[in-house]
Each structure stands twice: as C-alpha cells, then as structure tokens.
Image (cartoon, grey):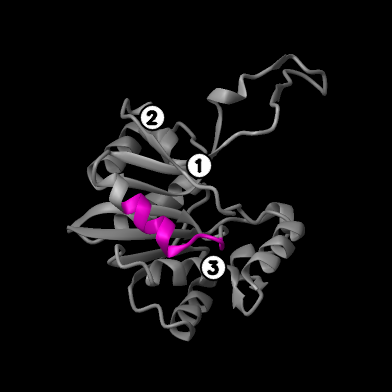
Amino acid sequence: MMTTAIILAAGKSERMGAGTDKAFLSLVSKPVVAWSLLAFERCPDIDRIVLVVRKDQLVASKAVVKMFGISKMFKIVPGGQRRQDSVQAGLEACDMDTRYVVIHDGARPCVTSDLVSEVVKFVKRTPAVTVGRRVTDTIKRVEKGTTVSATEDRTKLWAVQTPQAFQMKTIRNAYKALGKTEVTDDCQAVELSGESVKILESRNPNFKITTVEDLQLAAAILK
C-alpha cells in the first residue's frame, strides 16, 4: 500500500510576469520547488514522488532532483494547460500499487514533513482531506464592481491549501466523473462527485508564492 506524492510545478506564474517560472526561482539557497521536494523526501510516510512540470523544464527538474538527492523521485512528467490536467498527468504516472496520493503545490515552499505525515495519517481514515485555516478577516461579497453586496458569516469559512490527500480510488473516480467542468482544487472535484472532504487545521505559514512580495516573505521564514 504505497503512498505517492504528486508535486505540481507546471503553472504559468502570470502574476510574476511573462516568462517567469516561479517553481525554479531562487529562494534562499534553493529553487522554490526544491523546498517542497525535500519536505516530502524527508517524510517517512511518503514512498514515492511524482513531479509535474512544464515541458521546457524537464531537464532542469532532473538537475534539481540530482542536486538535492531526491531518492524517492519516481517520475517527472509534463503537465497540461490547466491545473487539473497536470494533476491527471500525475495520477496516470503513479505506480499501480499506490493506495494513497498526496497532491501539493510546488509553489508552497513552507510545507513541512510533519504536516505531510499528519495528512497521510488522516487520509487512511477518510476518503479525502485538505489542509486549511479558519478565515479570521471579515469577508464581503461583491456582486458587481466594488460595491459590497453582503457580509459573509466567517465562522463557516476556511481558506484551504495543500497538501491535499486522497484514497486513490476516490480521486480517480472524482476526475473521471468531472468531464469538462473546471475546478480550482482537487477537493472540489471530490465534492462534486458526492464524497465528503475533511479539513486538517494548520496554524503554520503555508502560503502559495504568487508575487515577488510572497517570495520575500518566504525567504524571511525559511532563512
């Protein structure tokens, strides 16, 4: 019963500027994606890693894997146009004996091995689990322009992150049933299939790098 991690690093990084690949930007002493690779490499509950990257980064990815000694690397595969296409490419690359799969955004470098272990332990008891944080800001709904339409009840709101973990049968069936529907994360695909998703609360920084300011903040945390 293998547990395979799929690390996604095939995004376009549009908010970083045209042609920028945030997964391979330098963060302290390593490329951004290397921080996630090392967290999963060091996690005793992960057996194998599948890395999904842009086609033009396949060679660079192999160099990063070799440089940082990622011995659990099973396959490096090219991603697709959309995030969900990249996830499906990762799922197809998993070995037949993968029972559990953990999906993580390579642009979240603050992930820890301990957090990955918690998620893996949780998914052995429930079909799908995501890491998340309770929303503490007041949330306004804006239907049009910049005029507030309503104030949401934040006690019922969570901001979800990755890693997200699934029993393999659950995530495969969810994507098979999805068709052409677009989703913003893998748990949404599972929700649409009718399965329940549990949230594991995380209080440590685990944000996604989307801007230069995020990169600077991550550097301050990871020094």
Q: Can residue 17 be seen in this view?
A: no
Neighbours of disc 3 within 10 Å: few (<14), some (14-19), many (20+): many
Dot 1 amino acid type: Gly
x and y percentages locating residue 111 in the rendered image: 50, 60
x and y percentages locating residue 12 in the rendered image: 62, 56
Dot 2 amino acid type: Glu
Instruction: Name the residue carrying label 3.
Output: 33
The residue at 33%/40% (across/down) is 128
Report the side of 195 relative to 31 (left or right).
left
Q: Cβ–Cβ below 8 Å for labels 2 and 3?
A: no
x and y percentages locating residue 185 in the rendered image: 48, 41
Determine the secondary structure under disc 3. Answer: helix
x and y percentages locating residue 42 in the rendered image: 38, 72
Q: Can residue 63 be seen in this view?
A: yes
Instruction: Name the residue carrying label 1.
Output: 132
Above or below 204: residue 186 = above
Instruction: Name the residue carrying label 2.
Output: 191
The residue at 27%/38% (across/down) is 126
Which quadrant of the structure image shows residue 70?
bottom left
